[in-house]
Image: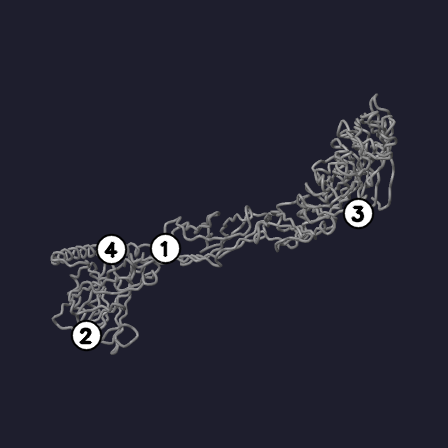
Amino acid sequence: MPFGLRRYARCVKWRFGCERSCQLLFFLFCLNDIGSGHIRYSIPEEMKRGSLIGNVAQDLGLDLKRLRSGRARIITGENNQYTELKADKGILVVNERIDREQLCGDVTPCSFSFEVILENPMELHQITVEITDINDHSPTFKRNSIPFEISESANVGSRFSLMRAEDPDVGVNGLREYLLSENDNFILKQSSNADGRKYAEMVLQKTLDRETNPRLSLKLIAVDGGTPQRSGTVNIDVIVLDINDNAPVFNQSVYKATVMENAPSGTYVTTVNASDADFGSNSLISYHFSDLSSGFGNYFTIDEKTGVISITGVIDFEKDKKYELRIDAKDQGGLTDASTVIIEVSDVNDNTPTISVMSFTSPVSEDSPPGTTIGIINVKDLDSGDNGQVSCRIEQNAPFKIKSNLRNYYTLVTDTVLDRESASEYNITVVATDAGSPPLSTKRTFNLKVSDVNDNVPVFSQSVYSAFIIENNSPGISVLTVVAKDPDENQNARISYILEDTKIGGSPVSHSVSVNAESGVIHAVRSFDYEQIKELTFVVKAQDGGSPPQSSNVTVKILIQDQNDNPPQVLYPVQTGGSLVAELVPRSADVGYLVTKVVAVDVDSGQNAWLSYKLQKATDRALFEVGSQNGEIRTIRQVTDKDAVKQRLSVIVEDNGQPSRSATVVVNVAVADSFPEVLSEFTDFTHDKEYNDNLTFYLVLALAVVSFLFITCVVVIISVKIYRWRQSRVLYHSNLPVIPYYPPRYSDTLGTGTLQHVYNYEVCRTNDSRKSDCKFGGAGSQNVLIMDPSSTETMQRIQNEKSILDEPDSPLEVSLV
């Protein structure tokens, strides 16, 4: 609304029943420029519920949309809400019946105030509603009669205070005047107190004569000024006493005193004093409150004999700031005098501030910017002056502050950016303290919860995860667990584990491992072989359930541990199924002569591949030994002529695994100086791993087989010769081209097959072959003899090359089939 002064008046006619006359009542709507907005309305009391008070929207210059969007509402500190705001229409109506006398008593003007508050932005408009009086009460007296005992010697002009009539109405509808019934002795004199209250006194205008008329009965009529006029009546009973011609007289017409509110019962206030010139019983004075209907007797008491006034009830400055008492002094003859006692009440700081919550928002999002409003409070103190001045603060060190933009209204706002992960809720204690001495304060705690947003990524407990798994594992075995934490909550903290799509050995990583999406447990999908793959490196992603989701990655390394699952493999000497390999040792060999070396490997690793060599069996254990680490077979004594030509050694090769694995190799050694001697001995050499006592039987059997094969070969050769001769004859006499004939194994000698049938061995002998890089023996040693007993061609070829063996430095190439 503009800050000008707008006034206008409205007239309303009120009609009562046939027993009441019609009269026009006026009420004004006053719109004053106070603060953000101040409207004043005036309405008569006793209006029906729903009666229109005024158009708030029009008077404040607001449209109905603003009232609805601002959530316009009435804020009152009273228990009764007499008015109601119709925000959809913008009007203010009566909510319940208003009784002016009940609301204000005899205080005029009678009004009550409240605030209309709007939000977004916040506006505060004060509205004052003045309640005008209607003549709905008649003057009444507290008692049915007023007794007087008046001495016949009472002087003309003596005054007698009468009971005051009570009329709850005010203004023109209140008590206007008193009327006294016609009589010869008394006239009525009317006066008003400083507060405007009317009281009446009877004034004696003619001396009483007890003998003529010992008792008088009068009527006192109280009349108000309303329309229609109302009245009340009380009887005055006057008993004429004999000879009391002096009335009590107060030494002060007005007494003044000051008391503190909340003073305890019995606290002294003041003392009134009156004197009587009579003597004896006629001079005895008693003190009384003149107006018994005023209710002062609930707060004060007066000693009838001494005139001491003291407190009997609770004095509250916030209810009454001043009391005006009228005191009567009466003697035994019935003569009285009156005086006024004015008691001022001093305020003490006895009311703590009150905190009312207008609005409060909880929870609030953690990403709310600083300055976000979370609550509006109203703070009041019923005390006055400094005792009613209130200041507000937040008790603890919290990321909030309190601001005051309007009188008695405070806004609670955020001071910094909130972080739910640091503090998920706050107990905000607002302290309201007045300026009294000592100051009084009130606390109110607000529980504010902070709602979560997805502002944190999952964090793994380790930067790199490592685990070991033994090869030949069972598929599906659990290897390790990756764990990620997200300080967010609910769905934002729900983590899913995902295996990043990479390749291991050319295959997707999912073919090797899998990860449980909820628990993060990594399982081996298949069985691993250390000899094929020794390490798996892949990436696991942790992703939360927020929107949008947050994620982080971690590298996982799984090291395959070797298991002793492979036995040693002997590379040399080669164990063939159809031929014999013999190492040739001359009979002149010295101690430590290197016969041969067993070469073996183990595809395992570590200690599982550490090999050791041991001589298991030998024809003569006293002649040879095997190096435990290098597998070298050497002589341990001088070779003699008594040593057998055929020496069979069984060497076992063991690894260092747990349990250990082993392989056995048979080494045949020929102790001889020439090949013929070797051939004569080795034609009956057996390839069996174990010697037995029926060696002769097996030798005879072998000879028979060899003879059979020899005869078969001779027959085949002769047949082939005849066939070739016939073919050559046919081809000689024909014109067909000549196609040469090749033996059945001829094509394989070129090495096109996977395994050649012809093996070439070249033995080089030198004078100092034991010291050369090649492992050659001395003269006549280090000759490898491979024989196939089933082939007679082999025997014949060796015989033809015997002369070559006799030359010490000549190379020997033996081709065996």
Neighbor class of circle 1 (other Cα within 10 Å; few <14, some 14-19, many 20+) is many
Q: Position of residue 796 (x, y in %)?
A: 20, 64
Give the Cα distance between marks 3 and 4: 137 Å
The residue to which callout 1 is attached is 471
Q: Nearer the viewer, mark 4 or mark 2?
A: 2
- Disc 1 residue type (three-letter): Glu
Label 3 with label 2: CB-CB less than 8 Å: no
Q: Position of residue 694 (x, y in %)?
A: 11, 57
* Chain-order first, disc 4 or disc 2: 2
Assign a secondary structure to mark 4.
Answer: helix
Q: Is residue 206 above or below residue 803?
A: above
* Chain-order first, disc 3 or disc 1: 3
The residue to which callout 4 is attached is 720
The residue to which callout 2 is attached is 589
Give the Cα distance between marks 2 and 1: 48 Å
Give the Cα distance between marks 4 and 2: 48 Å
Q: Position of residue 526 (x, y in %)?
A: 40, 50
* Chain-order first, disc 3 or disc 4: 3
Label 3 with label 4: CB-CB less than 8 Å: no
